Image (spheres, helix red, strand yellow):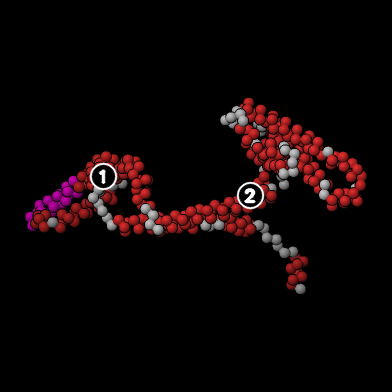
Amino acid sequence: MLRINRDNLRNSHETPWLILDLVMLGILFLNLAWLIFDALYATDFIYSQIDTFFPALINAYDPIHHNFLLVDLVFIGIFLTEFCFRWIVAIVRKEHLRWYFFPFLHWYDLVGLIPLGATRLFRFLRIFSILHRLHKYQIIDLNRTAIFRFFAFYYDVFVEELSDRIVVKVLSDAQKDIAAGSPLVDEITEQVLAPRRPVITQWMAGVINHLGQSISNDEHGEVIREHVRKSVGKAVRGNSQVSTLNYLPIIGKTIENTLEESVTDIVTMSLVNLLSDIDAERIDHFISVGMHDYTPTADALDKEVLQVVNECLELVKGHIAQQRWKSELAKKESTMPVTEPSNETTVERNL
């Protein structure tokens, strides 16, 4: 049931305009109802029925029917006056970038003023425009109406089905291009990554510097320092020359432990300094010079990258193809109350 929220109507700063909308809405309904009645009156079947049951109505309405254009012109005059008034207010308030934008944005109002059978249908759009404004200011709540929920649901179904099929078709065509040997990897490298090379190198330098600071941190770098300590200790103990220190009495083991700790500290600090001193220029130089002659198995790498892209597109297609409106409909049906059978019906079934 469509109800008017009087509190929002009183508290709204657009109360005069909303009242005007309500008045125009009533006039529109009257005009459209009159148009429908006059169109039905012009048919032979309705005319004969009225002539049979209400002959006095024929005598009273015939002059109006033959001059109905004049009656419609009265409504057209009201609608045109209201349109011009809103246009002037829009110019004063500077609601649009140009003063002449208003009639283009409300073209359906002007088309509906043409007194022809086809153009009069555009007056229904004026009703929807007024209802939208009233709903926008929460004077009425269209969400509570069954008709609005019905059309909104099936509109969402239509848009979802149409958009999903278009997106799935586009992704399928992209997969076909990739399978046909599309130079996607080269284009990504040249057109996407290459222009952003300074940003990427700056980001890589920041990550590496942060890694170096994390290693030097007493709390966050303990894992890496412990790993370095174990690796250096294993290397020191496995060295044949260092292992001869064990033959020295008393001080041999002490020297070995001291050497192990010193090498561990040196390696750790070298690693921290190396990571902390790297900047974007050095990374860019390394990519330009150091990796210039690097030629990995390009075909295998390209195929793997394309396979990753293809699998990602397949996952996206599977996610898009899910008909979410069906799950929403099933959820609504599951929340609907189930009517319990009456006691009389249960007794009759038992008998």
Label 2: which secondary element: helix
Q: Quadrant of the C terminus?
A: bottom right
The residue wearing badge 2 is: 152
Q: Main secondary structure of the magenta part?
A: helix
Q: Quadrant of residue 180?
A: bottom left
Q: Residue shown at 28%/57% (left/top)? A: 297
Callout 1 crowding tier (Cα within 10 Å): few <14, some 14–19, many ≥20: few
| 287 magenta-colored | no
Q: Residue shown at 70%/42% (left/top)? A: 122
Q: Residue shown at 87%/42% (left/top)? A: 62
Distance from the alpha carbon under mark 1 to that under mark 2: 57 Å
Residue 56 lies, in percent from the top left, at 92, 44
The residue wearing badge 1 is: 288
Left or right of residue 67: residue 76: left
Bounds of the magenta span?
247-266
Residue 192 lies, in percent from the top left, at 37, 45
Callout 2 crowding tier (Cα within 10 Å): few <14, some 14–19, many ≥20: few
Q: Earlier in the sequence, mark 1 or mark 2?
A: 2
| 258 magenta-colored | yes
Left or right of residue 299: residue 68: right
Left or right of residue 270: residue 43: right
> As drawn, which residue projects farthest toward the left?
248
> As drawn, which residue projects farthest toward the top?
92
Q: Residue shown at 75%/35% (left/top)? A: 76
Label 1: which secondary element: helix
Residue 107 lies, in percent from the top left, at 65, 37
Closest to the observer, 326 or 28: 28
Amino acid type of the residue tagged 2 in the rendering: Ala
187 w.r.t. 342: above or below: above
Amino acid type of the residue tagged 1 in the rendering: Ser
